[in-house]
Image (spheres, helix red, strand yellow):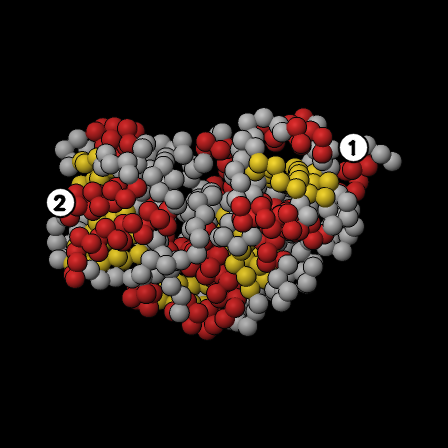
């Protein structure tokens, strides 16, 4: 058998690291962290690899040459001639490339299968030993929940790895020589878009969760419906626990409509009183009413809000993430005392509702990781009177409702970023009397000093100056961590010896949805 049917048959058989990948012609789209991991994996498997990248990374290019992959650096505004002549049997796309990218449309038109890195990782997951996978997605809270779940699992003596969109490619985790018991995989909507829900490349996770759903990345997906459909894929084929947000009806519908394995349970979480098979909060106590025999008449106490408050973990959206992560861990039989003690040792990442300084009765908070309106709303709800630093790349999302919902708590607003027009107009509609300032500086090094100076001029004792941009950062900064670091530097430079707070350190950030 030759032709497309033969190629399809061969790909269907590639469901193990130990299958015969030799000589398979694979085009890899992108040479970022994900694309490099894909190329490295495929060359190790013996495939013939052609990497297509719009820009050259010299360090990775040198390594590609050593491992035997070819690199074509091209703007990729059209299909490179090298790809035309390569006769690819498979294309693996990095998550940042839009579905309507010329290379992807070319592949679809020719019937060339398109995988993402997650499907490849699932197929070769048995290189060392096949770990159970837990999948985490949502518009916001993914990274915190992934880190929490992995921390809880590890506290029980399990080899658990947080990976995926969190910054560590899943392919690196499955190739780790030590192997893992559980992979807690953060999935962006970009990665889920390419993930099949049936067939040999479909993931069968131990547990899965979509934390919440709000409009985001509409510039990538095209419509809110397409974005939601991508997120819903997280629940497909779940074996044990489909964890959903009781306060977000969209996540409940995702679970109800998902095709899961027989015996999989729906586990709700929320900040209200939990029902049987739920996690929730009763009189300041976080409770598990899902994983105990007497769940119709009793609950297990995980931790109290009073214990979480001094750790900076008592904001409502953080508590929701704790409940979701606890549900994932409890589905894997992590004992309640282990969950409790591990939670008390957990700390949030830098740039997630991080206190930079407290001086003159004014608290300066860095939530640069609030890269969309949904995340910014959760941050705003955690504080009283706020001087809000907002703006950046809105990614096609309308922030009008966010502004309208929170004008009552604002002392002033300071708008940064290049997408300022829509935000300024929203404040004009909903809060025409609110002090509003625009930072017109476009130089990266000047934006935050100007924003901080403006905030200091209007903030009063008892206020919170909150950097919660509701937007991506790449218009003026390298990433959200760079934006947050520059906020820290500007605050400390302005306050001098009065500044106190936490250092801004953390892993390389991702802003994928």
Residue 230 horizontal/vertical position (percent) = 54, 39
Residue 490 horizontal/vertical position (percent) = 23, 50
Give the vertical position of 74 relative to 147 (above or below).
above
Residue at (64, 65) in percent of width and height? 177
- Please state if 177 lies on the left or on the right of 453 as rendered: right
- Mark 2 falls on what kind of element? helix
Observer-nearest residue: 33 or 61?
Answer: 61
- Please state if 479 lies on the left or on the right of 153 as rendered: left
Instruction: Tell me how far mark 2 sits from mark 1, CA to CA.
Output: 66 Å
Give the vertical position of 384 relative to 132 (above or below).
above
Residue at (82, 37) in percent of width and height? 6
Can you see residue 498?
yes
Residue at (22, 28) in percent of width and height? 429
- Mark number, residue 394: none
Residue under circle 2?
Answer: 458
Observer-nearest residue: 164 or 265?
Answer: 164
Residue at (77, 38) in percent of width and height? 8
Residue under circle 1?
Answer: 4
- Mark 1 falls on what kind of element? helix
The total number of labels drawn is 2
Can you see residue 249?
no
Residue 301 horizontal/vertical position (percent) = 42, 68
Which of pointers 2 and 1 lies earlier in the amino acid sequence?
1
Residue 509 horizontal/vertical position (percent) = 43, 50
Q: Do callouts 2 and 1 mark residues in contact (Cβ within 8 Å)?
A: no
Q: Counting other residues with Cα less than 10 Å from the Cα at mark 2, is it few (<14), some (14-19), or many (20 or more)? A: some
Q: Counting other residues with Cα less than 10 Å from the Cα at mark 1, is it few (<14), some (14-19), or many (20 or more)? A: some
């Amino acid at each position: 058998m030759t032709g497309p049917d033969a190629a399809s048959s061969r790909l269907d058989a590639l469901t193990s690291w130990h299958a015969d990948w030799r000589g398979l012609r694979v085009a890899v789209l992108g040479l970022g962290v994900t694309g490099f991991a894909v190329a490295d994996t495929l060359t190790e498997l013996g495939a013939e690899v052609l990497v297509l990248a719009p820009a050259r990374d010299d360090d990775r290019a040198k390594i590609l040459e050593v491992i035997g992959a070819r690199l074509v650096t091209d703007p990729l505004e059209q299909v490179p001639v090298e790809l035309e002549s390569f006769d690819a049997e498979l294309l693996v796309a990095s998550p940042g490339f839009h579905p309507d990218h010329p290379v992807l449309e070319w592949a679809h038109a020719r019937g060339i299968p398109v995988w993402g890195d997650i499907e490849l990782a699932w197929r070769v997951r048995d290189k060392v030993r096949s770990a159970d996978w837990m999948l985490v997605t949502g518009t916001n809270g993914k990274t915190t929940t992934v880190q929490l779940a992995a921390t809880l699992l590890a506290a029980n003596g399990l080899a658990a790895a947080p990976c995926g969109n969190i910054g560590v490619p899943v392919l690196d985790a499955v190739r780790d020589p030590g192997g893992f018991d559980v992979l807690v995989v953060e999935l962006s909507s970009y990665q889920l878009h390419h993930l099949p829900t049936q067939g040999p490349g479909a993931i069968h996770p131990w547990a899965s969760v979509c934390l919440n759903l709000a409009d985001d990345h509409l510039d990538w997906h095209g419509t809110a419906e397409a974005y939601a459909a991508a997120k819903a894929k997280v629940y497909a084929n779940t074996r044990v626990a489909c964890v959903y947000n009781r306060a977000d009806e969209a996540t409940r519908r995702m679970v109800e409509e998902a095709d899961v394995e027989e015996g999989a349970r729906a586990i709700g979480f929320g900040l209200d009183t939990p029902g049987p098979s739920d996690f929730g909060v009763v009189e300041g106590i976080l409770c598990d009413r899902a994983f105990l025999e007497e769940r119709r008449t009793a609950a297990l106490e995980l931790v109290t809000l009073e214990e979480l408050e001094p750790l900076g973990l008592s904001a409502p959206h953080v508590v929701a993430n704790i409940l979701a992560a606890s549900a994932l861990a409890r589905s894997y039989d992590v004992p309640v005392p282990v969950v409790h003690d591990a939670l008390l040792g957990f700390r949030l990442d830098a740039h997630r509702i991080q206190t930079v300084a407290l001086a003159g009765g004014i608290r300066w908070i860095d939530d640069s990781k609030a890269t969309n309106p949904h995340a910014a709303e959760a941050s705003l709800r955690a504080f009283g009177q706020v001087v809000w630093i907002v703006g950046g790349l809105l990614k096609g999302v309308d922030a009008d409702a966010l502004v309208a919902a929170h004008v009552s708590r604002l002392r002033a607003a300071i708008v940064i970023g290049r997408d300022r027009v829509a935000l300024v107009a929203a404040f004009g509609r909903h809060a025409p009397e609110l002090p509003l300032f625009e930072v017109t500086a476009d130089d990266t090094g000047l934006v935050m000093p100007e924003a901080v100076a403006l905030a200091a001029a209007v903030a009063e004792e008892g206020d919170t100056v909150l950097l919660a941009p509701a937007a991506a950062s790449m218009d003026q900064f390298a990433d959200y961590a760079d934006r947050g670091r520059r906020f820290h530097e500007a605050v400390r430079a302005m306050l001098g010896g009065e500044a106190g707070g936490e250092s801004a350190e953390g892993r390389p950030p991702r802003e994928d949805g």
